[in-house]
Amino acid sequence: MNFSRITINHNQMNGMPCIRGLRIPVATIVAMVAEGMNNEEILAAYPDLENDDIAESLRYAAEALRERELPLVMHA
């Protein structure tokens, strides 16, 4: 999968995946979506973002989860 909007610079934000070289981590965008914010609210909070940045952040997060197994705690 190709991610043209996600950049990783080890000298910026401790190498966290960010949007287009901006200091906006992918994790921040994904967390905002998880908290129930819609695209308009996210774009208002980060005017440098575009709708495609949000969509690619979610695709990147989904692909990252496919690449590793995360431990889950099973509740009875």
Image (cartoon, grey):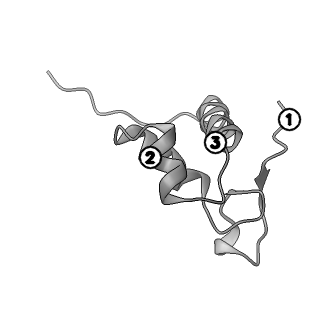
Name the residue rendered at 26%, 26% in the picture: 74
- Where does the image place residue 65, in percent across and percent down from the top left? 58, 34
The residue where tag 3 is placed is 57
- Badge number at residue 74: none
| Dot 3 and dot 1 residues touching (CB under 8 Å) | no
> Looking at the picture, does residue 70 appear above or below residue 25?
above
Three-letter amino acid code at the position of disc 3: Ser
Nearer to us: label 2 or label 3:
2
Residue at the spot of label 2: 41
Q: Does residue 62 appear left or right of residue 40 in this picture?
A: right
In three-dimensional space, the C-alpha distance between marks 2 and 3, rounded to whole angstroms, equals 16 Å
Residue shown at 35% from the left, 37% from the top: 36
Q: Tell me where residue 3 sits by quadrant.
A: top right
Circle 3 SS class? helix
Q: Quadrant of the N terminus?
A: top right
Estimate the x, y position of residue 6 in percent, counting from the top left. 76, 50
28 relative to 64, above or below: below
The quarter of the picture where residue 21 lies is bottom right
Residue type for callout 1: Asn
Q: Nearer the viewer, mark 1 or mark 2?
A: 2
Picture disc at residue 2 = 1
Q: Amino acid at mark 2?
A: Glu
- Asked which secondary structure carries label 1, the reply is loop
Q: Earlier in the sequence, mark 3 or mark 1?
A: 1
Cα separation between marks 3 and 1: 12 Å
